[in-house]
Amino acid sequence: MADHAVPTHAGGEEEPTRRDFIYIATGAVGAVGAAALVWPFIDQMSPAADTLALASSEYDLGQVPEGQQVVIFWRKQPVFIRHRTAAEIAAAQKDDAAPMRDPQTDAQRTVQSNGQAGKAQFLIVQAACTHFGCIPTFGGGSFGGWLCACHGSVYDTAARIRSGPAPLNLVLPPYVYSSDTVVKIG
Amino acid sequence: MSGPSTYEPKTGIERWLDQRLPVLRMMHDSFVDYPTPRNLNYFWTFGAILMLCLVVQIVTGIVMAMHYTPSITEAFSSIQRLKRDVPFGWLIQNIHATGSSMFFLAVYIHMFRGLYYGSYKAPREVLWILGVVIYLLMMATAFLGYVLPWGQMSFWGATVITNFFSAIPVVGVPVKEWLMGGFAIDNPTLNRFFSLHYLLPFVIFGVVILHVWALHVTGQNNPDGIEVKDKSDTVAFTPYATIKDFFATAVFMIMFAAFVFYLPDALGHPDNYIPADPLKTPPHIVPEWYLLPFYAILRAIDFAIGPISAKLGGLILMVGAIAVLVVLPWLDTSKVRSMRYRPVARQFFLVFVLVCLALGWCGAQSPDKVVWQAGEFSIAGSYAAGAAGEQKLTATGNTLEEVEKTFGKQLAGAIASNGAGTLTKTVVTPFQFKVTQFSQLLTLYYFAFFLLILPILGLRETPGRVPETIAKAIGAKRAAATERGA
C-alpha cells in the first residue's frame, strides 16, 4: 500500500490503486506462466517418440516347434510365444470352469485383438509377472504352466494366475494374425 | 538455546569480516562455544559420523561420475573399467559402494537412539521429521544408485520397485511408464536415474542444514531426557563434544576401512556382477540389506482385504511403516522423554529392535521357506462309527513309526468308545510356519508398537523418578557408583 494519502470511499474502504492492479495482473500472468512451464518439464519424462515408434513387431510362428516357446521383444518388453501341445490345450480347457482369481476361458486367452478367435496352439502373452514384473519360468508350479520364482506366483498352461500373490493373468498383448503363420503384435 | 554470542574477533581481518558477513561468529557459536549437555553418551556421536558419511559419498560420487557412462551398453563396462583400469578406481568404487551401507548402519543407530531417548518429543518434533525426510531421501538415493552399475540385480531391482507404482489403482500404470520413460526399464530410465542420483545428495545436504539448525534452536536431547536448566548442566562443544565426536568417528572409520579393504563385496550381491539381461530374472531378487525390513513388510501381505489387492495392501503397509515415524511425536503420550526412566517401555523397545532385525532376516529369505514345522511326518484321518458320527484324528512326529504309533493309539481309543466303523487316513504335510507368516507376525508388532503400545503405555505405566536436572542425574549416578565400589 502507498503510504501517502490514499483516496477512500465514504465507508472508509481503500480505493484500489494502480499498484494493486499491477500486483494482481503480474501475479496472475506469473502464475499462469509458471503452470504452463511446469507441464513440459513433467511431460519430458513420458515415453519418447522413438520409444513409441517400437510399438509393433511381426513374428513368423513357423519358427516355434510344438511344445516349445520363444521370447521376443515388443516395446522392449519380453513376450512369450508358446506353441502348445494338445495335452496343454486340453489341460487348460478342462480348467475353464475352475475357480480362479481372474476368470477367463482358454478361448479368451488366445483371442486376437480384433475380437476374432486366434489359434489354440499359439499362446501369446506378455512375459512380465503381474505381481512385480519378474519373468516366470515354464515347467514350474503345480498347474503345468509357469512359476514366478520371485514371489511364488503360479500360472497354468493358458498363463492364468492360479496361486500366489499376482493379481491378474499374464497380460495378452494386442495382436492379429497378418497371415496364416505371421503374427503382428502391437 | 545459545545465549548471547561470545565470539571475539582476534585479528583485524576477522573484525573486518565480522562486520560484513558474521560467518565466523556463526561457526564459533554453533561448534565451539555451543553449550552441550554434559551427560551425552557415545550414541550422540552418530550425527558427526553421518555428516562424514554424506561428505564421503558426495566426494567419491563426484569422482566416479568422471568415469561412468550412463548408457545401457556401456554402464556395466564403465564400472568394471573404473575398478580395474583407472588408477585407484577400485578404492574409490569400494568406498562409495561400502559407504552406502555404512551410511545406513549409522543412520539406523542414530534413529534407534532417537527412539530410545525420546528425541522426537516436544519441542523436537520438526527436528525429528526433518530426520525422517533425510532418511527417505537416503533410501531414494541408494535405490537410484544401485541401478547405475546395470547388473542383473540393478535391472530387476528397478523393475520390481517401479512396478510398486502399478499397484496404485487407475493412475498406477501411466505413472509407472512416466517414471521409466518407456514400457520397460531401459536407457531413458538409466539416464534419469543417474541425473537424480547426482542431484539428491545435495538435496540431502540442504535438509541436513535445516536439521542442524532445528537442533541448535531446541538444543540437544540427552540420555536422561531432561531439558538443560542452567550452565551447570552443560559443557562447551569444543573441546568436549568435538573430541568425543572425533574419537567415535575414528573408531567408525576403522570398521569402514575393514570393509573397504577386506570385504568390499560382502554387503552386495554376486548377481550384480552379471550384466543386466531383460530376458532372465535372477532366481532370488533381494534389495540391499538396509531395505530388507521394508521388503519383508511388503511381502507379508499375501491376501486381499476387500477391494485392496495383496499387492496394493503390501505397498500401503510399506509406505505406512515410514509414514508412522512422521506422526510418532503425537502418538507417544508419555510425559517422560527418556526410556531410561520407563522400565516397561524399555522392554517393549527391546522387542521392537529385535522385530526390526527379524524383519530384515525375513526380507532376505524366500517367502516359502519353512521357519518351523510341527514334525517330519503327519497323518490325518477320520473315523466314522455309526451314531457317534465322524471323528477327526491327527498325529505328528519325527519318524513315520512314531506317527503311526500315536495314530494307532488314537484310533484304538476311538474304536473303544464308539464301536466299529470306517477309517480313512492319509499322510499329509505337517503344520508349517513359513517366512510369510513370520513376517506377518513381525509386521503386526511393528505397527502395534507405534499405534497401540506407545499411545496406551504412556497413559498407564508408572515411570521411574526423573531427576530434576542433568547435574543431579550425574550426581546420583556417581553416588550409586561409589556405593557399589565401597
Image (spheres, coloured by chain):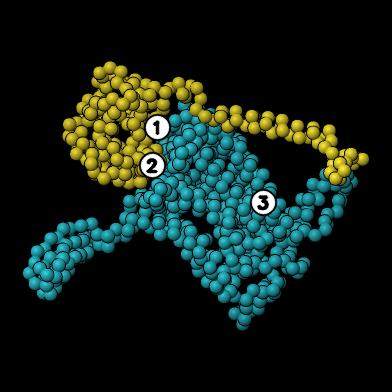
Residue B298 visible to the viewer? yes
Q: Residue furthest top?
A: A179
Secondary structure under tag 2 reads: loop
For disc 2, the marked residue is A131
- What residue is rendered at 50% in x and 53% in y? B321
For disc 1, the marked residue is B277
Q: Identify the chain drawn in cyan.
A: B
Which residue is more in the foreground, B54 or B291?
A: B291
Q: Identify the amino acid type marked 3.
A: His
Residue contact at pointers 3 and 1, CB within 8 angstroms: no
- Dot 2, how many residues are within 10 Å of its Cα: few (below 14), some (14-19), or many (20+)? many
Q: Mark 3 or 2, which is nearer the eye?
A: 2
Q: Quadrant of the N terminus of chain B?
A: bottom right
For disc 3, the marked residue is B211
Marks 3 and 1: same chain?
yes
Which residue is more in the foreground, B376 or B207?
A: B207
